Amino acid sequence: MKTNNKKIALVTGGSKRIGASICEELHKSNVDVMIHYRNSKENAVYLKDKLNKIRVNSTDIVQGDLCKIDSYENIISNVIKRFGQLDYLVNNASSYFPTQLNALNESDWNDLISTNLKAPLFLCQAAAKFLKEQKGSIVNITDAKENNPKKNYIIYNIAKSGLVSLTRSLAIDLAPDVRVNAVAPGAILWPENNQESEAGYRENIISQTFLKKQGVPKNIAKAVVFLLTAATYSTGAVIHVDGGSTHK
Ligand SMILES: NC(=O)c1ccc[n+]([C@@H]2O[C@H](COP(=O)([O-])OP(=O)(O)OC[C@H]3O[C@@H](n4cnc5c(N)ncnc54)[C@H](OP(=O)(O)O)[C@@H]3O)[C@@H](O)[C@H]2O)c1
């Protein structure tokens, strides 16, 4: 383990929305950040410049399509080349779209399983050696619906349930050096492609929370930072940040 006080995080899908909030909140906690993106280069560069203005040379970006197996090693080796170490890995990137049983196909399977399940596993595999050196920590972003499948989202449901199982398996396999936990968001931001926008749908989701309101990205980011940096006796845990909707 290196003796400096510097901490380095990799956040997948970190250029915007919840991922960007996680990057900002980690950065506020004095963690330097590698922002991973696939298509959103403009957002990634904007966030990098913003964070580097706050702390010089504290942030960089790395591109990679998480459906491609060779991207995993490449992303991790870019972090090591740039920062020399890796302390925290946040598996946040995700694809999300409905897949009805009578219409779904292998391409849907490959996309949803790759981004939500395969990439977290293989990124952890590629990062394990470096995280062990640092006694680091991993957070996987799952979904509050993990045990309560959402109609017509069969592949996404499978992927996010698998990610909870992966979290617990890795907590065992990487112990005692690396802690592995998950954050399960409820309704935080609606999808960008306007799915789930039909009248009454969103109101119905919000009515199912105990707190009767939608969350904000910072709610997720703060839980992630807590698990990565402060929850030193937690591993294999899932924190639900969902306004109570899981218990409804
Ligand atoms: N939003 C919510 O209310 C909510 C609710 C429950 C769970 N969650 C979970 O919370 C996390 C963040 O949610 P979000 O809504 O902010 O996510 P999002 O905007 O839907 O996706 C985050 C990023 O994932 C990246 N991504 C998608 N496919 C990729 C691929 N093949 N390779 C590499 N990157 C890929 C995209 O990067 P580029 O833009 O660079 O292509 C995208 O910006 C996700 O894991 C999601 O499942 C969110």
Image: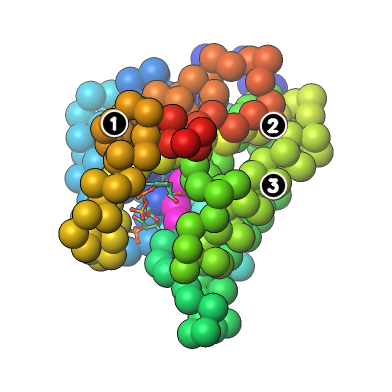
Q: Which residue is mark 2?
A: 236
Residue 4 in percent (x, y) is at 55, 16
In front of the other: 55 or 118 = 118
In front of the other: 232 or 100 = 100
Q: Is residue 154 above or below residue 7?
A: below
Please state, as top left, top right, bottom left or bottom right, where the N terminus lies in the image: top right
Q: Which residue is mark 1?
A: 212
10 Å crowding of disc 1: few (<14), some (14-19), many (20+): some
Q: Is residue 220 above or below residue 96?
A: above
Residue 91 in percent (x, y) is at 52, 45
**Pointer 3 with pointer 2, Cβ within 8 A:** no
First-in-chain label (3 vs 2) = 3
Q: Quadrant of residue 25?
A: top left
Asked which secondary structure carries label 2, the reply is loop
- Residue at point 50% right, 24% down? 7
- Residue at point 37% right, 39% down? 208
- Residue at point 69% right, 26% down? 235
Magenta segment boundaries in residue numbering: 90-94
| Three-letter amino acid code of the residue under disc 3 | Leu
Q: Could you tell me how far apart the alpha carbons at marks 1 and 2 are, in whole angstroms?
A: 29 Å
**Pointer 1 with pointer 3, Cβ within 8 A:** no
Q: Quadrant of residue 231?
A: top right
